[in-house]
Image (tube, rainbow, N blue to C red):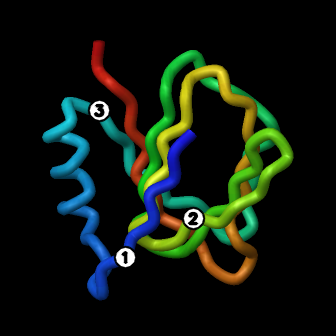
Amino acid sequence: MRITRWRADRKPTREEIEGVFKDEGMEFVVEDLPAGSEVKDHRHPFDEVRVVVSGAIRYNVAGNEFLLREGDRLDLPSNTRHWTRVEPDEGCVTIYAFRVS
C-alpha cells in the first residue's frame, strides 16, 4: 500500500487527475459518494488506485485508519482487505482506477 499526499498549494482538477491515469494506461471511473456512505470490509482481485477530487474518505486497512483528502492518492495492492467511509459532513468525489491488461 502507498499513500501519496497532495502537497501543492492548488488542488488538482478532475481533468488533471484523469489525464494522469490516462498517461499511466489506466481505466477509471468517477464516483460521487454521499456524505456518510460506507463500503463494508472487502477486497478486489486487482490493484485499486484512488484519488480524491473533493471531500474526504476514510480507509481502514488491516486495522489502520487514515483519511484521504483532496488530491491524495492511494495505491492499494490486489486482495488487500479494507473498508471505506465518507466523512459525515460532506460528500466525496473520487476517481477510482485500475490497470488495463
Read off the residue under disc 2. Answer: 68
Read off the residue under disc 3. Answer: 27
**Amino acid bearing label 1:** Arg
Distance (Cα) linking label 2 and label 1: 13 Å
Q: Earlier in the sequence, mark 3 or mark 2?
A: 3
SS category of the residue bearing label 2:
strand
Q: For the residues carrying marks 2 and 1, which lies nearer the camera in this image?
A: 1
The answer to whether residue 58 is above or below residue 95 is: below
Q: Residue at x 14, y 40 (%)?
A: 23
Residue 29 spot, x, y in % from top left: 38, 43
Q: Going by the picture, which residue comes out furthest to the bottom?
A: 9
Distance (Cα) linking label 3 and label 2: 21 Å
Q: Specify the quadrant that holds the N terminus.
A: top right
Q: Nearer the viewer, residue 79 or 40?
A: 79
Q: Nearer the viewer, residue 100 or 72?
A: 72
Q: Contact, CB < 8 Å: mark 2 with mark 1?
A: no
